Amino acid sequence: MMTPDDTDDALALESQLCFALYSTQLAMNKLYRGLLRELDLTYPQYLTMLVLWQRDRQTVSEIGEQLYLDSATLTPLLKRLEAAALITRQRSRQDERQVEIALTEKGRSLREQAKAIPHAAGCAGQCTPEEAAELRDALHGLRQRLDTQ
Amino acid sequence: MMTPDDTDDALALESQLCFALYSTQLAMNKLYRGLLRELDLTYPQYLTMLVLWQRDRQTVSEIGEQLYLDSATLTPLLKRLEAAALITRQRSRQDERQVEIALTEKGRSLREQAKAIPHAAGCAGQCTPEEAAELRDALHGLRQRLDTQ
DNA sequence: GGCGATTGAATCGTGCGCGATATAAATTGC
DNA sequence: GCAATTTATATCGCGCACGATTCAATCGCC
C-alpha cells in the first residue's frame, strides 16, 4: 500500500546513501587532518604523495587519472608540494606539453613517517581489516558504476 | 611470513578505505551536480534544503548539527539560498544570537521538483534499494565511530 | 544588579574541486 | 610543409570546508 508520504521518506536526509557518503567523507577528512598535521600535508596532498611513493616520475595527468582530479585542482596543489620541497616540477624534454613530477629526497624520506598512518586510521575507524576491505570494495564498485554513467 | 613491502601495501592508494570513500564521494558529487543543475542548487545547498523540507524554521546551528557543518560554512551558503529567494534569515526575538532560517513559498515549492532526484540518483548508482541501504548503514556506522574519536 | 563565562553567528584566510577558458606544443590532414 | 585539430597544462572564478578569531547576546553566579 502507498502512503501519502512515501516520497517524503525518499527525501529524508538520513535515508539517503549520498548523505551517508558525504558526511562520512567529512568525518574521514577530519580524522586525516589530525593524523597528517605532523607531516604538514593536507589530505589531497597526502593522496598525491601516495601516488608518487608507488611510482616516482609521473606527469600531472597520470597523477590525475589515479586520483580522479584534473589539472585545475592538481596544478596549484603540486605547486604547494613543490614549495614544501617535497617534489620537483619539470617540463618533459620529449613532449614540452607535459610536466614531470618527481620526488625530492625530502619527499621520499617523508614516506617513513607516513607508514604509521594507515594503521592509525584503521584504529580510529575501529574496523577489522575484513570490514574495511569489504566496505572499500563496495565503494569502489559504486564509484565505477557512477563513473560509467 | 613478513615480506619487505608489507608496509608498501598498506600505503597503496587503492587498498585504502579512505581513498575509496574520497573518490566515490567525488563521483557522487559529480552525479548530483548534473541532477541539480535544473534546480539551480549545489549539492550542499540541496542537503540544506532537505533539512528544511523535513522541518521548517530551524536555527543555523540546528541545521549544522544535522549536516555536520559549522557556521563558517553555513552562513555564506545560507546567504546564497536567501539571495535565490528560497529561504529567509531572521534574528530570533527570544534569543537575538540565533538566526532562524525559514522556507519561502518558492523554497517550499522547489520540493516538488526535488522529489524525482533520489530515484534518478539510485538509477545512476545502479543499486538495488537493499544494496543502497546496506552501504548507507555501513557508512553511518563508520561515521559514528569516527566522530566519537 | 553586575560581571565573567558561555553561546550563536559571522568573518577571515587557506586549500581544495571543478566548469570554463586560455595557451602552447604536438599531431593530423591535405 | 603548413593549416587545422588535438592534447597537456595552466588560469580564472565560484562555492564549499574548516581552523581561528571576533562580536554581541545571554547565562551563571554572587
Image (cartoon, coloured by chain):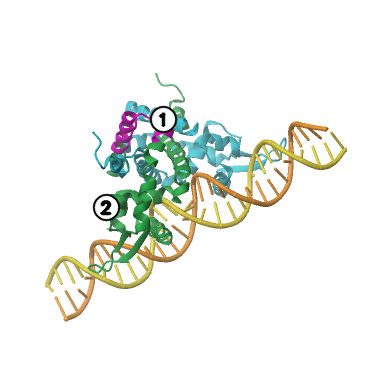
Chain colours: A cyan, B green, C orange, D yellow
Q: Chain of mark 2?
A: B
Identified at 39% across, 33% down, the residue is: B17
Is A3 on the left or on the right of B31, as rendered?
left
Number of marks: 2
Classify 10 Å Cα crowding around label 1: few (below 14), some (14-19), many (20 and above).
some
Q: Position of residue C3 (x, y in %)?
A: 22, 76
Q: Position of residue A92 (x, y in %)?
A: 69, 38
The quadrant in which residue A97 appears is top right
Give the residue pinned by disc 2. B55
Read off the residue under disc 1.
Answer: B126
The chain ID associated with circle 1 is B
Q: Is residue C30 left or right of residue A55?
A: right
Magenta portion: prevailing SS class = helix
Q: Name the image quarter holding the C terminus of chain B.
A: top left
Q: How far across and how far down the image is residue A84, in percent?
A: 54, 48
Question: From which residue to which does the magenta span run?
Answer: B122-141
Q: Residue at x 43, y 30 (%)?
A: A140
Q: Residue furthest top?
A: B1
Element under disc 1? loop
Question: With respect to residue A99, does D19 lie above or below?
Answer: below
